[in-house]
Amino acid sequence: MIEADRLSKHFGSFKAVDDLSFEVRPGEVLGFLGPNGAGKSTTMKMLTGFLRPTSGIARINGFDVQRNPIEAKQQIGYLPEGAPAWGDMTVKSFLKFIAQVRGLRGREAKAAIDTAIETVELEEVLHRQIDNLSKGFTRRVGLAQALLHNPNILIMDEPTDGLDPNQKHQVRELITRMAEDKLLIISTHILEEVEAVCTRAMIISDGKMMADGTPAELTARSKFHQAVTLHSPEAAKAAELLKVLPQARNIALEGNAVTVFPREGDEAGLYDLVAKLAREHNWPITELARERGRLDEVFRDITRPSAKAAWDRVAA
Amino acid sequence: MIFTLFKRELASYFSTPLAYVFLMIFLVLTGVFTFEIGNFYERGQADLQTFFLFHPFLYLFLVPAIAMRLWADERKTGSIELLLTLPITMWQAVVAKFLAAWIFIGLSLMLTAPLWITVNYLGEPDNGTVFAAYLGSWLMAGGFLAIGSCLSAATRSQVIAFILTAVVCFLFVAAGWPVVLNFISRFVPTELLQAISSMSFFSHFQAISKGVIDLRDIIYFAAVILVWLYATALVIDMKKAD
């Protein structure tokens, strides 16, 4: 279990992380979402004991990261941003070194290394220098390193950044597989990833927590949630009629698609109503869908004011 | 734990050409200094005075070359984040890195043994003095290295680390030269002058290399090493965020 108790990190007058509190329990896969510079990495660096918080306490399975750093660090497997390693080592010697530092010896170490190699599929590059590996393999070496001691807490900073679609898929499968008995925190700005692997998402912006919930709860905040979209060549004509429906709060027309946003309380029957109207007026339907909500839209809504402020800072 | 970290560090010297280039340059330069500039044969004395005489100057640019990569490289590649989130203490990391570099320089020194064998073949040197001088030279190298460790932690750039270390080491050496001391003596009181002179690597190394292993000289170098390593840990803690 991870507890962040009013964590803050200031760099000079800049508040990278500002009074952040949360708890994560085993079995959860928490996705840290946020624009670049929102404080995701800084938070992870404090949880893993790399940075000392300006104030607040981080606890890993009950161990205060600042007071009992060794015990806390033993609980964690950590993949820092960019998966750094010592490039002059071979993959094999690197993993051996990590095993030794993690206190694994002899047969135990060998078994752990073999398992890690198998899990992230590193056999073919075992004797190559890490410097000479592709980005995908380097990332996998980083993952192997984090998994090696079979920690029950895994913290990964942008685990799929820079990977091709196949590799991304692989890493996501890996995350889902591990999620069964571990606690995972991943940071990302790929929203589909959150919906694919996370049981919980937290949106951070300007070092503050803006939203915390399951991906479904977050998408429900979207104004598209429960809206009904009709794709039809007759969309413009349909829009005229749908606009005046008492159940419609608003509509949006975009090319051959018209979206109807329901009034509160009228969400349930909207789909059937639109379908019925389409049949009655013989509008040809290419697609009719009830929207689940769009995470990217929620994300933009929540973080845009701060993104704009950040941009203004840069511009100034 | 220190041993595990130390082993990795030491091995990393030999996984790149760096170690071999360094060893070669070190051996060639000690040879040149001893025979060409130091007139080893012409002096007609069976000792290694001329060999050791030039060590402070040799270290002035060879040790910064070893020390510059200690931390600057870790910060540049980001591996410092991996290193310091492993279950180890900062102190273990600092000491392990220092020891690996120090042992490496010790190895370089050992490879100059043919010179010592030559002197023993040509005459009958005082091997106790030679041993003391080797020890003194190694201790002095440790001092240089500890300074380099700290300055390498202060920057991401190996070049800047190299230059800073060379300059600071130069000051530590120069503080013991008669020329420099004469010059400073015009401005500062005698007590301060003595203090400055006693801070110099040069004076302490000279004392040991004459064959007198004085505990004070050893304590001096040990203190220099510890203070600068402590400073290294502080600097890393301060600068690791950026």
Image: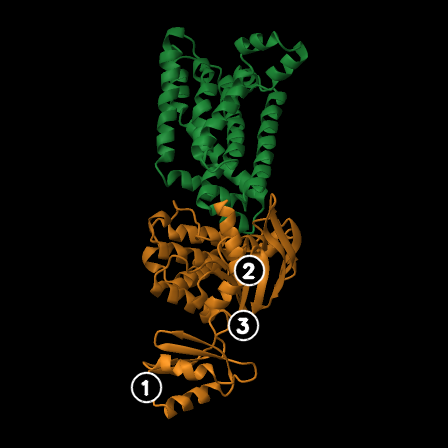
Disc number placed over residue A204 in the picture, else none? 2
> In the image, B139: left or right of B108?
right
Q: How dense is the environment of label 1, judged by Cα within 10 Å: few (below 14), some, or many (20 and up)?
A: some
Give the CA separation, mark 3 to mark 1.
Answer: 31 Å
The amino acid sitting under disc 3 is: Arg
The reply to whether callout 3 and callout 1 are in contact (CB within 8 Å) is no
In percent of width and height, residue A6 lies at 66, 57
Disc number placed over residue A221 in the picture, else none? 3
Is residue B105 something one can see in this rendering? Answer: no
Q: How dense is the environment of label 2, judged by Cα within 10 Å: few (below 14), some, or many (20 and up)?
A: many
Q: Nearer the viewer, residue A175 or A220?
A: A220
Count of marks overlaid on the render: 3
Q: Disc 3 or disc 1, which is closer to the eye? A: 1
Give the CA separation, mark 2 to mark 3.
Answer: 16 Å
The amino acid sitting under disc 2 is: Ile
The amino acid sitting under disc 1 is: Pro
Is residue A115 something one can see in this rendering? Answer: yes
Q: Nearer the viewer, residue A291 or A281?
A: A281
Q: Label 3 lies in what chain?
A: A
In percent of width and height, residue B143 lies at 54, 27
Which residue lies under the disc numbered 1? A284
The chain coloured green carries which letter? Answer: B
Instruction: In the rendered view, tell whether residue B44 sits above or below residue B138.
Output: above
Residue lying furthest bottom: A280
Q: How dense is the environment of label 3, judged by Cα within 10 Å: few (below 14), some, or many (20 and up)?
A: some
Q: Nearer the viewer, residue A9 or B109?
A: A9
Q: Upstream in the sequence, badge 3 or badge 1? A: 3
Q: Are marks 3 and 1 on the same chain?
A: yes
Give the CA separation, mark 2 to mark 1.
Answer: 44 Å
Shown colour of chain A: orange
* Element type where label 2 sits in the image: strand
